[in-house]
Image: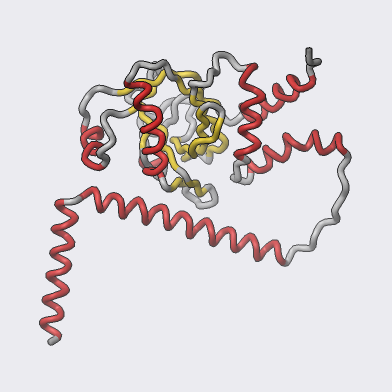
Amino acid sequence: MKRFTGLVLIALVLLAIAFFIYNPEILGEIWMWLVGLIGYLIYFFNKAADTLKNAFKTPEPDTAQSKDEQKSSGTDTLLTKLSKNEPDIEGLENLLAKSQPQMDSLSQENLTLLRYMDDGYTTLGLLFIEGQFFAYTLEDTHRDEKVSGNTRIPAGRYPLSYNRNLTDLTRRYRNRFPWFEYHIEIMDIPNYDLVYIHIGNTHQDTRGCILLADGVNAASPEKMVSYSRKAYERFYRSIYPRVKANIPLAIRIFDENWIKMAKIKANEAHALPQN
């Protein structure tokens, strides 16, 4: 009986190996799911530890703020949330809406990427489309001198197009996703080429490209994003038909210091007399 059970187990293992050999995309999906699950487990453990730590802290006395103090603390609150790796999406949407009229050529057709964190390995950011939050982003770190395959692209405004070449990566995406044709490419970047917006979870999944995701874990030692495929499909279905139809689109990328500068500009605009 034991021998029969052992043979059955061996047969099942061989069948599983054969299945994954002929369906490698399934293995990729399982791996991405496991990475996302591990990221969320780490995130929740860190949250639980913080909750326990705060439970034993002595509460600080509550001090009332004047209206002027509350207004001036708006910037500090936004930046504090960012420094704690918890982006204030609603605050940034309002900030973007206030600051866009003062920035050059940011039309409603443009994509805006706000980088908010760089730990020396990974850059985390937020992608906005038409001023509305769309997805989290992950890139390589900033470097003063480019290291090929390990450096994010410079801040700036770049047109979007699509790469019409049938590359190995394009073939892999076509095999996995029936809705995929060609990669959306960020064009005219000095000293860079073949920079795409695509799927991935950590900085090891990109070589200067921008990864999209619906979840982010900035609390783990290795920063990562999750639910990347879902975010990318939503992005691709929205943007690819437009670039394929030659509708002018561009992405405007801002480094981390933009948040503070834009807040100052927004405050200055608010202080101007209205007609």
Q: Above or below — where is 135 with respect to 15?
A: above
Name the outermost residue toward the top.
275
Q: On the image, which quarter does residue 274 sit in?
A: top right
Q: On the image, which quarter does residue 179 sit in?
A: top left
- Residue at horizontal 37%, vertical 42%? 200
Question: In this rendering, would 126 be left or right of 11?
Answer: right
**Image coords of residue 32 (percent x, y):** 35, 50
Image quadrant holding the C terminus, namely top right
**Image coords of residue 242 (percent x, y):** 37, 22
**Image coords of residue 189 (percent x, y):** 41, 19
Q: On the image, which quarter does residue 103 sit in?
A: top right
Q: Above or below — where is 12 with respect to 79?
A: below
Task: State the residue in front, 272 or 6.
Answer: 272
**Image coords of residue 86 (percent x, y):** 60, 45
Task: State the residue in front, 100 or 149.
Answer: 100
Task: State the residue in front, 275 or 213.
Answer: 275
- Residue at horizontal 45%, vertical 46%? 225
